[in-house]
Image: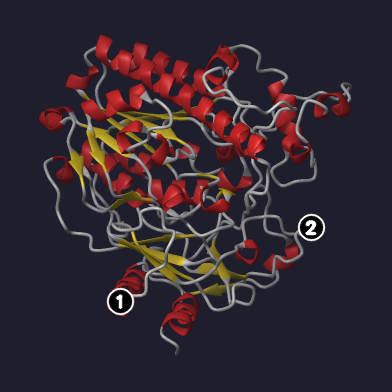
Amino acid sequence: MKAVFLLFDSLNRLMLEPYGCTILETPNFRRLAERSVTFDKHYIGSMPCMPARRDMQSGRHSFLHRSWGPLEPFDNSFPELLKGADAYSHLVSDHYHYWEDGGATYHSRYNSFEFVRGQESDPWKVLLTSPIERIQEKYHQSQNDLTSKQNPYNYMINREFIKEESDFPSVQCFKAGFEFLDINRAADNWLLQIETFDPHEPFFAPERCREKFKTDYDGPILDWPRYERVTEPQDEIDELRANYFALLSLCDDLLGRFLDYFDANNMWEDTALIVTTDHGFLLGEHDWWAKNRMPLYEEISHIPLFIHHPDHASKAGQRRQSLTQTIDLMPTFCDLFGAEVPDEVQGRSLLPLLEGDNSDRSAAIFGYWGGGINVVDGRYTYFCYPKDMRNQELYQYTLMPMHMTKMFTVEELKSASLVGPFDFTKGVPLLRIAHKSKADTKTHSYHFPEKMEDTNTVLYDLESDPGQTTPLKDQAVIDRLNNELFRLMAETDAPPEAVQRMRESLLGN
């Protein structure tokens, strides 16, 4: 078997023509849908970037136990399992979070890997003698908070060194992927993962892509929305959205070059292709930008998935309505290469669905650590929040005490105690580390529940209200989804305090 896994970041499903978009053209995603099976009810699991990748590699949810952090020693990693099946895995990525403290154990699971520099706040290029003030003048004032966690300083410097289209990290990612294929496509038993940070913000694309999307905005560079409510004037809203469209247009072009390569080398006949994203992104819908702060609306949680398999080529162009999730990717890769799927895996191989739909999964959960726990059954979405987001009994369960870019502090670790294993840790006990209130953002700037807003427990009917604008009151549906929620929490071996806070909130005891 040969397989290619194309992973984009922050790809809004509703901005793709195969999923109904009419405001911009994505001809190569349309081509992809014609050559593959398109999944219509594919959802995230753990949020955001690295928690999603932990789900992808391990095949189970992590958000009930852990926020952003590395793979754990007890996690099952599909690239590691492929080695046991004599399959070779290679990662090409410009997703710089892999090379931070909170992601440092992911890329090294592959047999080999290549890192392309320069995305977002990647600490790549250095300008010690060039005054930052000169560069800052090019950017909108909202992108000039150099103390922000989003750290626009590194982006400003990196962008000074990205002049030609060939300099863009995503373009280099695909180029490196083509180089791997040129050398190795005739071999057997390999998986190539091409993973680009695009169209993640900042929305910086080549000028030829930007020319397609004109706006009335006449100001400094504005391509990085804050993770906040929409308060900008209309011309700035239009500019931010246009820059996302331009970057998505680049992604579509890169996908097209990849499909051309498949065509030219008859790879459809012997190579599987899986294309998806880690999560979506709000572009002003629900009066919010981005993710993390607000409820996990469809634009974030409901994501695209396309699969081509040579043995199921006759199914090309078909669509599937089965409920699937990010955790299903790991057992799918194992299934492709004949690797045994460990007992701890919650996900299910997607390969049987290429032949036709089934109803094996009645509901799925997704969310952020310490945030709401959300339930979807294919028709309804149910956002379930604790009563008091600012005063929860919260713990991180880990043997790898790393935040996104830093180790846990000594003060945090003073609360650590050793607790018995969960059913997925292979008998290994864990550190239980108390969560301190993150109201003091000067000392704690990671993803944390205290900054989440609109934390209301609500039910939406996606059939009659796909935009999730009008909460529904239907006690029979709520009771059924409550049962699904607690069943799925039990299957994930959720910490007892997590179960308790949801029972107090949803069941009143």
Amino acid on which disc 1 is placed: Asn
Q: Position of residue 346 (x, y in %)?
A: 30, 58
Q: Is residue 267 above or below residue 61?
A: above
| Image location (x, y in percent) of residue 316 | 17, 30
- For the N terminus, the quadrant is top left
**Badge 2 local density, few (<14 within 10 Å), some, or many (20+)?**
few
Q: Which mark is residue 208?
A: none
Label 1 SS: helix
x and y percentages locating residue 242 in the rendered image:
56, 30
Q: Say whether residue 36 is left or right of residue 395.
A: left
Q: Quadrant of residue 427?
A: bottom left
What mark, if any, has residue 442 been given in the picture?
A: 2
Examine the rendered structure and indicate whether residue 445 appears above or below residue 101: below
Secondary structure under badge 2? loop
Which residue is rendered at x = 37% and y = 70% of the image? 472
- Type of the residue with mark 2: Lys
In three-dimensional space, the C-alpha distance between marks 2 and 1, rounded to whole angstroms, equals 40 Å
Examine the rendering and report whether any part of residue 202 can be seen: no
Which residue is under mark 1?
Answer: 483
Instruction: Please give the name of the residue rendered at 37% of the width and 37% of the height, measured from the top-left corner.
Output: 276
